[in-house]
Image (spheres, coloured by chain):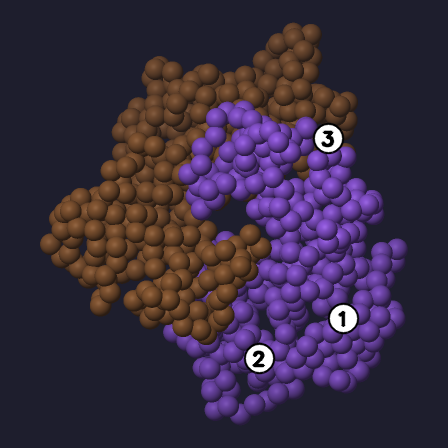
Chain colours: A purple, B brown
Amino acid sequence: MADIALHHVAKRFGEVEAVKDLSLTIAEGEFLVILGPSGAGKTTTLRLVAGLERPDRGSIAIGGHDVTRLPPAARDVAFVFQQYSLYPHMSVYDNLAFPLRSPAHRAPEDEIRRRVTTVAEKLRIAKKLDNRATQLSGGEMQRVAIGRALVRDPQIYLMDEPLSSLDAKLRADLRVELKRIQMELGATVLYVTHDQVEAMTMATRIGVLNEGELLQLGSPREVYEQPNSVYVAARLGMPQINLLPADLVPGLSLPSGVSTVGVRTEHLVISEPGGDHLPARVHRVEHLGDQTHVHLDFNGLNLVTLAGPHRSFAHEERVGLRLIEPLYFDGEGRRIEASPA
Amino acid sequence: MAEIRVERLHKAFQGFVAVQDSNFVIEDRSFFVMLGPSGCGKTTTLRMIAGLELPTDGRILLDGEDVTFKRAAERDIAFVFQLFALYPHMNVAQNIGFPLKCEGVARAEVRQRVEETARLLRIEALLDRKVSKLSGGDRQRVALGRAIIRRPKAFMMDEPLGALDAEFRRLMCEELRDLHDRIGATTVYVTHDQLEAMSMADRIAVMNHGVVEQIGEPQEIYDRPATMFVADFIGSPPMNFLPFEGSLRRGERSVGYYDARIEVPEIHEDFSGGALTLGVRPEHVALSDSASIRGRVFAVEYLGTNQIVTIDIDRAKLKARLPARTAARVGETVGVSFRAPKVVIFNATTGRATRSALFEGANRG
């Protein structure tokens, strides 16, 4: 395994600056997730590391070696795509063995058998080795695709939304499995996705990318609890963070320069009306089983908060809202640290 | 507006039973969701209510009137398929007004009702726009407008949000439900997405293999699943299952799970012995040093508001929903306990929940 270092990397396609001056180090054994919407530059970043694109500026090193000018085959990276492309006429075993039989590797057959069996057990598809690839379920096919990357034992793994074509339950299972395998192997993984749950649950660190720019890099907890901008705050968290214009919350003593106050749903607490609580009206209650989302109307703003599953509200009930640990942002959307009182 | 009554509804396609003896009532003005995996019979049921499919047996009553063999056009129901099907050469107002124009409604009235509909959907400002210039959300609102302008007795919706990405789907769910609250038309909505069902429905019918397994309010179904299928289909992550062999005695408040005793709601039926399964929702699993059931932390998934911790207890892998602050490290050994009043005991052979104090409390607040 190896680390990856991107140093001031930039890539432009015609008018579009896909990646802007990106500097990023992925430590050996780290699971780094780049999170961003489509068009953010995530896939381009991955392709730059793989060698499928050449950067306009900057350099890329893998395991301390500058690979900026090296072709993909010379970089020893394994790429897992969103669309698993297995060979339909081959068995699962032959699909897994394929990379090891390529001219670049040419491993002896007993070595191949050992590695394919080990990987199949890790991925829990050992019983399916003799099946045709077409006889597998979607989840099993994606496991084989991941397995094809694992058998090669490359220096780094690059993964481009490998779970996004699977249904919700399967995705949840494979998230846990992928993370477990990565930890067992101590593998270095660079993973891109638009799915915040994948980022939060699997990443050692998350890089939030938008319009080719890395906005914040940190552990899931740091990025969620200490976002550096309104954009990052709104990108993570379901339901989304509540954003209130500062002039609507006169009761709070705000640091100077605050234009937006952000309150996570779990930090907006329903209390008695009156006092210095924000007056709001219950608009709709969603019972989702494990928790209840309460939609509130506050000065024409729609706010969302959480309540216990068995709390009931009258239609249009008037309540007071208490803010815990609010986050402050300036007019540019940058975070302002609350000064200690 | 309408109440829809489905009685002993049955549909077979050349020996394959798509819908088996369904009975339910959809109350006037309610939002009713039929939920289940693909092939469970939910769409077939919807199509029979709409008149697009004839039942093999049974009756469908619309406001008390038997419409079982009436043609779709005679039922005064609007069917909303995957949205987005708009006429690109017409503007927004023409698209919305099209169904009325087809019925030969006078132009002045069409215009008035288009305006009313646009107000309801909050797209008054868009009426003169070309539909090709609209955002995805606005196109969807226009498609809805075309369905509601006829003011039908009821709406049938078949996975209308299926093609959208997750975040946009959440937004449209809210809008659809809001719209329903404003116009109050009886709505029957089909989906395979449990979160969509939970967030929108007044009542949910969970279907599997052509059979309605349970009907009830979302929270009711979540808290008191009638079958293991329902318990597993609803909730993310789903209910934890712990299979074991044992017997049940009326009046007891615990069961033997291997060498541990697990507290449960008071048992209300006798079971002489056999395969049973305990069902526990992830939020009713807690870490407890003194607990006799012990396991190893297998995975920790931080979600911001809380975290999902997977614990391997040898015989099963349990998922616990814990506060984000609770310390849990992969590999460490922990004890687990369950919130006794919420535990469900299933007969593993039939898949049905056994009777207990948990279920006696049903529908009594």
Mark 3 crowd level (few <14, some 14–19, many ≥20, 10 Å Cα): many
Sequence-first disc among 1 and 2: 1
Q: Which mark is residue A104?
A: none
Q: Is residue A277 left or right of residue B291?
A: right
Q: Which residue is mark 3?
A: B131
**Is residue B94 or residue A233 the one in the foreground?**
A233
Q: Is residue B189 left or right of residue A69?
A: left
Q: As drawn, which residue projects farthest toward the left? A: B272
Q: Residue at the spot x=67%, y=21% of the render?
A: B118
* Number of numbered callouts drawn: 3
Tell me how far mark 1 sits from mark 2, CA to CA: 20 Å
Mark 3, chain letter?
A: B
- Find out whether the residues at labels 3 and 1 contact each other: C-beta distance under 8 Å: no
Mark 2 crowd level (few <14, some 14–19, many ≥20, 10 Å Cα): some
Query: Residue B65 in the image: x percent, y percent?
Result: 35, 14
Q: Which residue is mark 2?
A: A186
What amino acid type should be assigned to the residue bearing mark 1?
Leu
**Is residue A173 or residue B152 the one in the foreground?**
A173
- Find out whether the residues at labels 1 and 2 contact each other: C-beta distance under 8 Å: no
**Residue B181 visible within the image:** yes
Quadrant placement of the N terminus of chain A: bottom right
Secondary structure under tag 1 reads: strand
Q: Residue at the spot x=46%, y=16% of the render?
A: B1
Secondary structure under tag 3 reads: helix
Q: Which residue is mark 1?
A: A24
Residue A262 placement: quadrant: top right
Tell me how far mark 2 sits from mark 3, CA to CA: 52 Å
Q: Is residue A309 left or right of residue A58?
A: left
Q: Is residue A33 above or below residue A196?
A: below
What amino acid type should be assigned to the residue bearing mark 2?
Gly
